Image: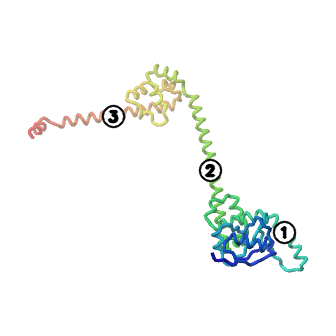
């Protein structure tokens, strides 16, 4: 396998060396020797510019020539490069001390979003697997810093952060919708239980129902149908309808436990249904009689001769 030229540095960037390596393992070995790491030290390879961890051999081979790597020994962590704006040496040294404290306090957060940025760099579809905290950390990263880590333009990175924010907003909407649905289902279940309880309290005992049925001639089924909520008259037989009409409003009020208005409407509906059925029967009988009369004896003889 052909060797590729690389550049390595330590975590403080004070030591920098150029070397060649044909694999990630050889890079660790040659780089550790160049940087003076002790034998047996645990070495992690990251990209010097953004801290992306390089642990896959295929990814290493895909990187361009002269890529700058940082080798971290044991518990060392990647930090972004420090920039100075001129001044005397002692002023720069003071600036180094101040920035070092700030970097140390933000190492964990910087490392977290850099790792997430590396995931996005390898596969943008990994967004769907990220937690809301991970998405929020990527949204909060300055656009230029995230663009540098991803290798994207500032405009493309801004569009990516807007997409991440929309994903966060949609997840929040889904959570609120789920909570509202659960609350609605609880209310519906509570109302249903309350209705069943009230119906149970208002319903007569089975023994009472049998006594009422035997005293009035109504069967328990007829009483059950009469108490139905939707057009009970359509589910009664002609005999049952006649019994309801003959029973009268006052007796039915006592049997059903209803008020006058509700019972009157029931009796009227039963009477109308009974009349409608009788009219249908009379109409059928009339048509049958008319059909028999229209068939004269001469017509019958003519049909027989044929």
Q: Residue at x 87, y 76 (%)?
A: 92
For label 2, the crowd category at 10 Å Cα-Cα, with few meaning under 14, some 14 to 19 and many 20 or more, is few
Q: Nearer the viewer, mark 1 or mark 3?
A: 1
Q: What residue sits right under mark 1 in the picture? A: 100
Q: Is residue 258 above or below residue 183?
A: above
Q: Give the residue at the far left of this rendering.
A: 305
* Residue toward you, 223 or 159: 159
Q: CA distance from mark 2 to mark 3?
A: 56 Å
For label 1, the crowd category at 10 Å Cα-Cα, with few meaning under 14, some 14 to 19 and many 20 or more, is some
Indicate left or right for 76 with 174 as reference. right
Q: Which mark is residue 171?
A: none
Q: Which mark is residue 178?
A: 2
Q: Which of the image's four quarters has the C terminus?
A: top left
Q: Element type at marker 1?
A: helix
Res 111 → quadrant: bottom right
Q: What residue sits right under mark 3 in the picture? A: 279
For label 3, the crowd category at 10 Å Cα-Cα, with few meaning under 14, some 14 to 19 and many 20 or more, is few
* Residue toward you, 284 or 11: 11
């Amino acid at each position: 396998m052909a060797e590729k030229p690389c550049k390595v540095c330590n975590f403080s960037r004070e030591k920098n060396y150029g070397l060649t390596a044909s694999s990630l393992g050889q890079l660790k070995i040659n780089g550790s020797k160049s940087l003076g790491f002790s034998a047996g030290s645990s070495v992690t390879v990251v990209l010097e510019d953004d801290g992306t961890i390089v642990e896959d051999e295929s990814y290493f081979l895909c990187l361009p020539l002269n890529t700058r790597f940082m080798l971290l020994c044991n518990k060392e962590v990647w930090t972004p490069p420090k920039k100075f704006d001129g001044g005397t040496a002692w002023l720069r040294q003071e600036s180094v001390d101040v920035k070092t404290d700030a970097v140390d306090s933000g190492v964990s957060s910087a490392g977290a979003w850099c790792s997430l940025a590396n995931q996005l760099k390898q596969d943008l579809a990994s967004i769907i697997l990220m937690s809301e905290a991970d998405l929020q950390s990527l949204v909060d990263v300055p656009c230029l810093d995230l663009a540098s880590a991803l290798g994207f333009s500032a405009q493309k990175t801004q569009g990516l952060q807007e997409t991440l924010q929309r994903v966060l907003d949609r997840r929040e909407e889904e959570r609120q919708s789920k909570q509202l649905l659960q609350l609605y289902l609880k209310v519906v279940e509570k109302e249903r239980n309350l209705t069943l309880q009230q119906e149970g309290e208002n319903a007569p005992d089975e023994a009472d129902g049998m006594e009422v049925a035997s005293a009035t001639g109504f069967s328990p089924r007829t009483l059950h149908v009469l108490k139905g909520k939707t057009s009970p008259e359509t589910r009664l037989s002609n005999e049952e309808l006649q019994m309801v009409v003959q029973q009268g409003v006052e007796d039915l009020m006592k049997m059903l436990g209803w008020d006058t208005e509700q019972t009157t409407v029931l009796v009227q509906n039963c009477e109308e249904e009974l009349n409608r059925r009788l009219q249908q029967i009379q109409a059928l009988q009339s048509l049958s009689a008319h059909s028999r009369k229209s068939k004269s004896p001469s017509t019958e003889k003519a049909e027989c001769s044929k």
